[in-house]
């Protein structure tokens, strides 16, 4: 395969799309794993004092439990949303990568066969 054929604009496009989809898929897979871990092992959380307090300026036990529950629910919801986002990104990038990579592979044998010298006939 001649160097000019290997680095044609079309091949450059196909290889760049494959590279970009692989990088995006890698980041999406990492985000998916992180979201799964966050869903299974939630952060203990940090709770602010945004609620009515009793006369002494502290939260009542009931209000603190309510805030902890709300924070946990919010964290679970965010983890699920992150998992859906990462999964969707993987579902979009995987077919794009496979399509472009197959295009590259289908063109390589034909071009490689053209440049290969003829085999000597045994006999």
Image (cartoon, rainbow, N blue to C red):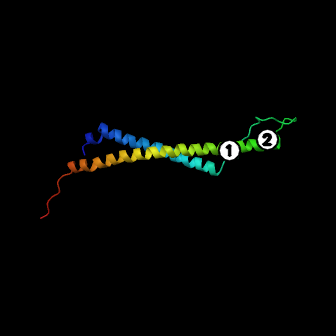
What residue did someone put label 2 on?
A: 63
Judge the density around disc 2: few (<14), some (14-19), many (≥20) Cα neighbours within 10 Å.
Answer: some
Horizontal and vertical percent position of residue 97: 40, 45
- The residue depicted at 78 percent of the width and 42 percent of the height is 64
- The residue depicted at 17 percent of the width and 54 percent of the height is 118
Q: Relative to the observer, which residue lies in front, 122 or 108? A: 108
Q: Secondary structure at mark 1?
A: helix
Horizontal and vertical percent position of residue 4: 26, 39
- In the image: residue 106, left or right of residue 74: left
Question: Which mark is drawn over residue 73?
Answer: 1
| Total marks placed | 2
- In the image: residue 28, left or right of residue 47: left
- In the image: residue 63, left or right of residue 42: right
Q: Relative to the observer, which residue lies in front, 72 or 113? A: 72
Q: Relative to the observer, which residue lies in front, 57 or 115? A: 57
Horizontal and vertical percent position of residue 13: 35, 38
Work out which residue is located at the far right of the displayed protein and give it. Answer: 55
Judge the density around disc 1: few (<14), some (14-19), many (≥20) Cα neighbours within 10 Å.
Answer: few
Horizontal and vertical percent position of residue 104: 32, 46
Q: Secondary structure at mark 2?
A: helix
- The residue depicted at 17 percent of the width and 57 percent of the height is 119
Q: If the image is split into quadrants, where does the C terminus sit?
A: bottom left
Q: Which mark is first along the chain, 1 or 2?
A: 2
Task: Give the Cα separation between the discs numbered 2 and 1.
Answer: 15 Å
Work out which residue is located at the far left of the displayed protein and give it. Answer: 123
- In the image: residue 56, left or right of residue 103: right
């Amino acid at each position: 395969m001649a160097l000019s054929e290997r680095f044609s604009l079309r091949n450059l496009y196909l290889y760049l799309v494959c590279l970009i989809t692989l990088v995006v898929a890698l980041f999406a897979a990492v985000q998916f794993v992180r979201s799964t871990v966050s869903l299974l092992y939630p952060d203990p959380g940090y709770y602010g004092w945004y609620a009515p307090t009793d006369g002494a300026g502290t939260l009542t036990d009931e209000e603190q439990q309510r805030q902890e529950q709300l924070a946990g629910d919010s964290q679970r919801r965010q983890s699920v949303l992150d998992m859906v986002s990462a999964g969707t990104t993987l579902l979009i990038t995987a077919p794009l990568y496979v399509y472009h990579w197959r295009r590259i592979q289908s063109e390589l044998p034909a071009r490689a066969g053209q440049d290969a010298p003829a085999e000597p006939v045994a006999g």
